[in-house]
Amino acid sequence: MGDAPTRWKSSNDLYRKWVTVLKRSGVRFRCPYQMRHTFCSQLLSAGEHPMWVSQQMEHSDWAFTAKTYAKFIPTDPDDNGGKMMKRWNTVQMLSNEVCT
């Protein structure tokens, strides 16, 4: 078994880590809630199925996801879940560097 996950002592600890990750990755500052929208639009741009993305976002109606993010939905989706994981390899590596 691995080590127990690190607990944040306060929201300030999380905020400092967040800012560090953004700076190291070259991403301009965005609050964590804004990243939710980025995550959704990237999933759809990568070709993930809108209904699957809606479930990941915990939207009550997948039509809301489709309507709100329609411009990011390509007409040729396949391989649900796989495409986005390829994009996150760099993010995972940066996160591991910052959090260890």
Image: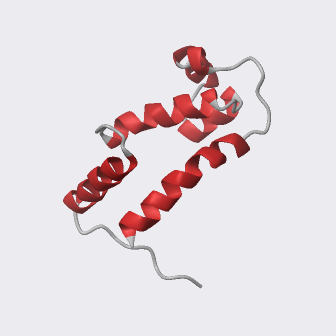
The residue lying at 74 percent from left, 17 percent from top is: 75
Q: Is residue 79 left or right of residue 67?
A: right
Q: Nearer the viewer, residue 83 or 70?
A: 83
Q: Position of residue 54 (x, y in %)?
A: 61, 32
The residue lying at 65 percent from left, 47 percent from top is: 86
> As displayed, is residue 2 above or below residue 68?
below
> As displayed, is residue 81 above or below residue 18?
above
The image quadrant that residue 62 belongs to is: top right
Q: Position of residue 97 (x, y in %)?
A: 42, 66
Q: Is residue 64 left or right of residue 100?
A: right
> As displayed, is residue 1 above or below residue 53?
below
Which color scheme does this rendered protein use? secondary structure
Q: Position of residue 70 (x, y in %)?
A: 59, 15
The image quadrant that residue 1 belongs to is: bottom right
Q: Nearer the viewer, residue 90 or 47?
A: 90
The image quadrant that residue 71 belongs to is: top right
The residue lying at 69 percent from left, 20 percent from top is: 74
The residue lying at 20 percent from left, 58 percent from top is: 12
> As displayed, is residue 99 above or below residue 25?
below
Task: Give the residue furthest to the bottom.
Answer: 1
Q: How many marks?
A: 0
Q: Nearer the viewer, residue 4 or 63?
A: 4
Question: What is the quadrant of the C terminus in the image?
Answer: bottom left
Q: Position of residue 77 (x, y in %)?
A: 76, 27
